C-alpha cells in the first residue's frame, strides 16, 4: 500500500498525500496513509463524502480544501 500511495496520481489522493506529507514528512506520511487506506487510494471515500456533503456540487477551491482536510484529520488521528 505504501508504494501505491507514493505513486498515486488521482487528484483527490494527491491532495491528501501532499497535505499529510507536508506535515509529517514523506516516510511517516505515506505509512499513515497506507495504514488508514490500505488499498492505496482514498478517492472513493473522498468522493462519497463530497457527494454527501455538497449534493454532488463542489463549488470552490475552499470546498475541495475542506473535504480533503476532513480526511487529513482522519489520518492524523492514527498517529
Image: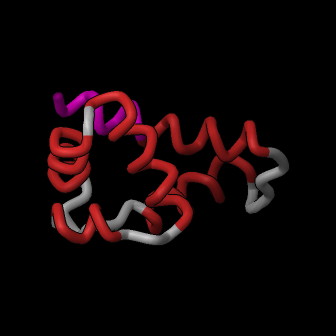
Query: In the rendered image, which quarter contains the N terminus?
Result: bottom left
Query: Is residue 12 one of those drawn in magenta?
Result: no
Question: Residue sitting at 80 percent across and 57 percent down?
Answer: 57
Q: Nearer the viewer, residue 54 or 28?
A: 28
Question: Residue sitting at 19 percent across and 33 percent down?
Answer: 78
Query: In the rendered image, which quarter contains the C terminus?
Result: top left
In terms of secondary structure, what is the magenta stretch mainly?
Answer: helix
User: Above or below — where is 4 with respect to 78?
Assistant: below
Q: Nearer the viewer, residue 56 or 22?
A: 22
Residue 23 percent across, percent down from the top left? 35, 28
Residue 44 percent across, percent down from the top left? 46, 68
Question: Residue sitting at 18 percent across and 68 percent down?
Answer: 3
Q: Nearer the viewer, residue 54 or 33?
A: 33
Q: In the picture, residue 65 is in which quadrant?
A: top right
Range drawn in magenta? 72-79
User: Above or below — where is 1 with respect to 66?
Assistant: below
User: How many numbered markers are drawn?
Assistant: 0
Q: Is residue 59 left or right of residue 2?
A: right
Question: Residue sitting at 25 percent across and 50 percent down?
Answer: 33
Residue placed farthest to the right in the image?
59
Q: How is the image coloured?
A: secondary structure
Residue 66 percent across, percent down from the top left? 62, 36
Q: Is residue 14 left or right of residue 66?
A: left
Q: Is residue 13 left or right of residue 37?
A: right
User: Above or below — where is 77 with respect to 2?
Assistant: above
Amino acid at each position: 500500500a505504501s508504494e501505491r500511495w507514493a505513486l498515486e496520481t488521482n487528484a483527490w489522493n494527491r491532495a491528501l498525500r501532499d497535505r499529510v506529507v507536508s506535515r509529517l514528512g514523506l516516510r511517516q506520511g505515506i505509512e499513515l496513509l497506507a495504514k488508514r487506506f490500505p488499498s492505496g487510494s482514498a478517492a472513493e471515500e473522498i468522493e462519497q463524502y463530497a457527494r454527501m456533503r455538497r449534493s454532488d456540487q463542489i463549488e470552490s477551491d475552499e470546498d475541495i480544501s475542506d473535504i480533503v482536510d476532513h480526511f487529513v484529520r482522519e489520518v492524523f488521528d492514527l498517529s
